[in-house]
Amino acid sequence: MIAAAVVALELACCVGLGAALLRCLGILADLKPGERACWSFAAGFGVLGWIIFVVGALGLLEGTVLVTVLIVGASGVFLLGRPLVAPLEVGRDAVFWSLAALLFVVAAFDLLEGLAPPADADSLAYHFALPKQFIAAGRLEFVPRAVDGAVPLLVQMTYTPALSLGGERALTLWTMVSGWAVGALFYTVCRRHLSATWSLAATLVLLTTPAVLYGAGTGQVETRMAMFVLVAALAAATALRGGPLRYALLAGVMAGFYMGSKYLGGVVVLASGLTLLAGRGWLRRAAIFSAGALLAGTQWYGWNWYHSGDPVFPLLFGWVDYTSPGYWDQSHADFLRDVFFGRETVVSRNPLWLLLYPFWATLMGDPVMESGRTGLGPFVLLMVPFVMAGLWTRRDQLRSSTLAPIVLLVALHYALWFFTGSSQRVRHLLPLYPLLLLCVMAAAAMRDRATFSRPMAAVFAISIALQLAGHAVFTAAYARHWLAGDSRETFLERNVTGYGLAKWLNANLKATDRVALGDRQLLYLIDVPVFFAHPVNQALLDLSPSASGPERFYAQVRRLGITHLALRRRGDAAAGPDEPTFERLIGSLRQSGCAEPVEKVDARVFASRTLRGLAAGVASFDILTVTPQRCPFR
Amino acid sequence: MRPPIPRTGEMDATPKIFGLVLWLWVVVASAAYLYQFLGLLGPIARLLGVP
């Protein structure tokens, strides 16, 4: 009950803060009833993330302050005006109501996920683990870890009030609600260009997209970032068509929120900014846009710069001076470049692959692209000929179309993303996907003759049926949990690989201990202090292949206050030159008398929580305690 | 001389062919996606020697 109340209050807070921002910009009055609430939530979501950053940086992350922020923010709801939503037009056809019924099924599936404990690995590793760490500390802490530590965390800041005030249940319900908000916003955007039935169909396609199913109900940020892109693109398009300059400012603020959520956000700022350069008055538009983006999106870059000397830690290593030499070094920089960036690049970055990538990713997806279970689905691919027919039929109206700036923004964003060397995982394009979906729908919507409409209806039916089937499989674990009335422990044992280790550590270690381990999916679930011993992303505990000798490793262990080490037993096959550094160094530490085993823990492990048959088994973990009294090193 | 009057259905031939092409695309692309989604395309491609 408290969890639901906290989520309702945070929802009202986001809407209220956004309404206040849009009212200040003079944009709220331009919007239709349904749009006012949805745009307000999107803007307020970013504003709340920004405010919680300031609260956390000041060391005020405590219950009373967070409640005050939520209540003050929620008071802005009264700025929305009436009516909140447009009256439902009567006389919809059977297709509309069928789609609405399917949408309720999707919502019911999502609710099952929202009521279950978190199980997504990335969420447990940092989306939820970092807010939990900040709440425990009462302030933000700089985490000198590449990729998932010292990164922009605007979206995760909105998880903090939910987790702090309403606990884990409020946290998972909040991700559910903020995921739905994307669907609601997308529907209102579609209604500007499409009929109610088409808009509902597009929303259903979006909400059942594999990447959305995977990420919307978890802590993954991409789905929520789609809200920022949608409003930024619409505001930029309005500004470009000669709208007031305040729309350029709103576009800048929303693009800034995107930048504050992910390093990749610079791409959307650049794409939106370049779009605004077209036409007369570009200088003023671009200046105002840039001011908005800098104001809304640079806080985490400043935070990283203040603590490490590198605003985009650790990408400028070698170019700027670091505040601490222990945060990063050349071997980790080389290692990260080779392992992370090298491994995440599947196809060459040239113009040919720019065109082929979407088809390749959809039909021949490499495992690194993750275009199957967490991809964008078949819909856009199936719609290609319908879109081409639509564009050809209306080729003389394309330049004057209200969607032309949005198409430009999508194309620029995609090209910049492709050529800037970021990961080629398909789901990283998810924030852009609703805009693409809107353009595809609008281009094909004129095909209302039977010759076109029947196969197009088949495209919808196939896409939605496939995606809904995937949704049902994905939800099975949550449904089983709910129907069986399982405990949190049982659910986590079934759905989080290696959870048995976290359970043992929680039961046997104290708040004064600190355990180092390499199992990222356990970080949120471990209630005692923990250090994530990642071989590439951090340098405080040097686990790069070149690291050798127990003496330096022991010194680092002691400096980090690590009292225990947990590692997965891999058997004799992993020994030798290919043995992971963590295991090798712990072995040498043990031989030196600086660590000794205290327990062997068996835990269930598996490769996929959705497809249970994938490589399931039992793994053994060795728990060792550091023994300074017997250690020859000082 | 007046042009011959088209017989019934002849005027709609182009849209019908286009409609057929659309159906073909929908069926083939859906099947291709389903194969890849279910992870079958990879093993089949490997069987055929595609790297």
Image (spheres, rainbow, N blue to C red):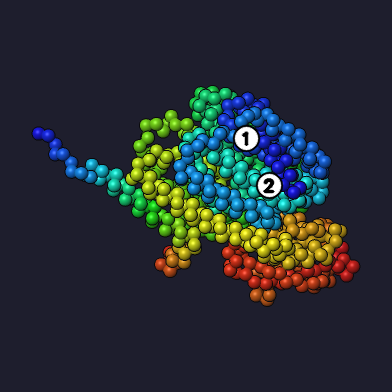
Residue that appears at 66% across and 50% down: A219
The amino acid type found where label 1 is placed reads Ala
Label 2: few (<14), some (14–19) or many (≥20) C-alpha neighbours in 10 Å: many
- Quarter of the view holding residue A287: top right
Label 1: few (<14), some (14–19) or many (≥20) C-alpha neighbours in 10 Å: many
| Residue closest to the far left | B1
Whether residue A204 sits left or right of residue A50 in the image: it is left
- Quarter of the view holding residue A495: bottom right
- Quarter of the view holding residue A521: bottom right
| Image vertical order of residue A397 relative to residue A439, above or below | above
SS assignment at label 1: helix
| Image vertical order of residue A453 relative to residue A32, above or below | below
Q: Chain of mark 2?
A: A
| Residue closest to the far front | A91
Residue that appears at 43% across and 50% down: A459
Q: Position of residue A78 (x, y in %)?
A: 69, 30
Residue named by callout 2: A174
The amino acid type found where label 2 is placed reads Trp
User: Which mark is drawn over residue A192?
Assistant: none
Q: Position of residue A45 (x, y in %)?
A: 67, 39
SS assignment at label 2: helix
Residue that appears at 38% across and 49% down: A455
Residue named by callout 1: A37
| Residue closest to the far bottom | A572
Q: Position of residue A81 (x, y in %)?
A: 64, 28
Viewer-nearest residue: A489 or B36: A489
Q: Chain of mark 1?
A: A
Q: Position of residue A16 (x, y in %)?
A: 69, 34
Residue that appears at 54% across and 53% down: A210
Q: Quadrant of the C terminus of chain A?
A: bottom right
Viewer-nearest residue: A306 or A609: A609
